[in-house]
Amino acid sequence: MAQIQWFPGHMAKARREISERMKVIDIVIELVDARAPYSSKNPMINEIIKSKPRLIVLTKKDMANESMTAKWVHYYESLGYQAMSVNLKNFNEYQKIIEKCRTVLKPKMDKELSRGLKPRAIRAMVLGIPNVGKSTFINKLANRKATVTGNKPGVTKAQQIIRVDKDFELFDTPGVLWPKFDDEHVAKNIALLGSIKQSILPLDDLFIDAIKFITLHYPELLQQRYQLEIDLEDPDWVLDTFDHIAKLRKIKPLKGETDYDRVIELFFSEVNDGSIGRITWEDPSCIKE
Ligand code: G4P
């Protein structure tokens, strides 16, 4: 789990370094998390990459609700972007991303050829906030086991180009960007993705919000995982939910009381590892812009 402290200096540096790289790349692969495809975006990406061709890739589609993912891809396409969803744990998906980049850039490459320029490889760069799958993506294409980059703001120093095949090249370090910290809806979703350790919300509030959301949108998941049916009109639903999960999972009481912290911890570990089921935390209609 990433824990990055972002300061104005970091943001300016990230921005500068990424702008610098824009000069030598043909396409940006912007990774966002399919479970919250708006909240996991950087707020200034348009200003940072300007008119550079871009492919928005919704990662972790295996953990998100399928029809919501289709809705989000459609939403980004309706804004004029190229978008697709993937499960980066599945190697077959990588070729699809490369193919899509080629399709996006075909007009540009054709133009170069018609002007007599030599055929050349497309050069791409991966961008995104922490935990969206940047290192997984790059490491897989580079055929490496672990990342050397870490989650440092900006672009990490060693700049190497990986030749994935004769037509496709990739920077071996991603651009690490920041999420929209100042928006409470976003901060909550980012915390629900497990993308950052510290949440601005106390964990018990986050737990209550998450259970409420799942009750409203995915009640069958609570039923399947915890045999829980919640009536949000019932004034005792919060305490009853804690007690129910604690009893079901045999969480030992603390001084005769339900161990709320353990229940919360268990619940979030099951949300983060996907064992509760596939959840998308936001709908395109939530976007106020
Ligand atoms: P980052 O560089 O953008 O910070 O993200 P990173 O690649 O480190 O990925 C963060 C976590 O998300 C990793 O899990 C990674 O395996 C997982 N992940 C990335 N893409 C997908 C996807 O499409 N589907 C699923 N299910 N998981 C994905 P981790 O627990 O930190 O490590 P590990 O499980 O790989 O050991």
Image (cartoon, helix red, strand yellow):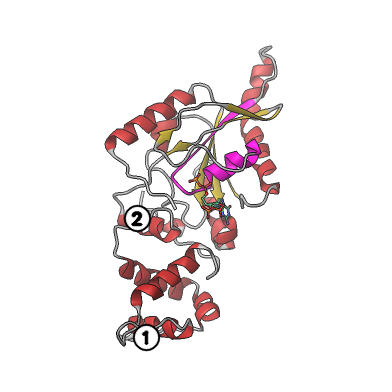
- Identify which residue is drawn at 53% across, 22% down: 24
What distance separates the C-alpha of mark 2 from that of mark 1? 27 Å
Magenta range is 122-143
Q: Dot 2: what SS?
A: helix
Contact, CB < 8 Å: mark 2 with mark 1? Answer: no
- Identify which residue is drawn at 37% across, 85% down: 240
Location of residue 11 by image quarter: top left
At label 2, counting other C-alpha atoms closer than 10 Å, the crowd grade (few under 14, some 14-19, many 20 or more) is many
Q: Mark 2 points at which residue?
A: 187
Q: Reply above or below: 164 against 146.
A: above
Who is closer to the viewer here, 136 or 38?
Answer: 136
Q: Residue furthest top?
A: 116
Q: Does the magenta stretch include residue 188?
A: no
- Identify which residue is drawn at 36% across, 53% down: 288
- Which percent across, then down, holds residue 73? 55, 51
The amino acid on which the numbered mark 2 sits, given as a three-letter code, is Ala
Mark earlier in primary sequence (2, 1): 2
- Which percent across, then down, holds residue 62? 60, 59
Q: Reply above or below: 13 against 209.
A: above
- Residue 240 got which mark? 1
Q: Is residue 213 visible?
A: no
At label 1, counting other C-alpha atoms closer than 10 Å, the crowd grade (few under 14, some 14-19, many 20 or more) is some
- Residue 226 got which mark? none
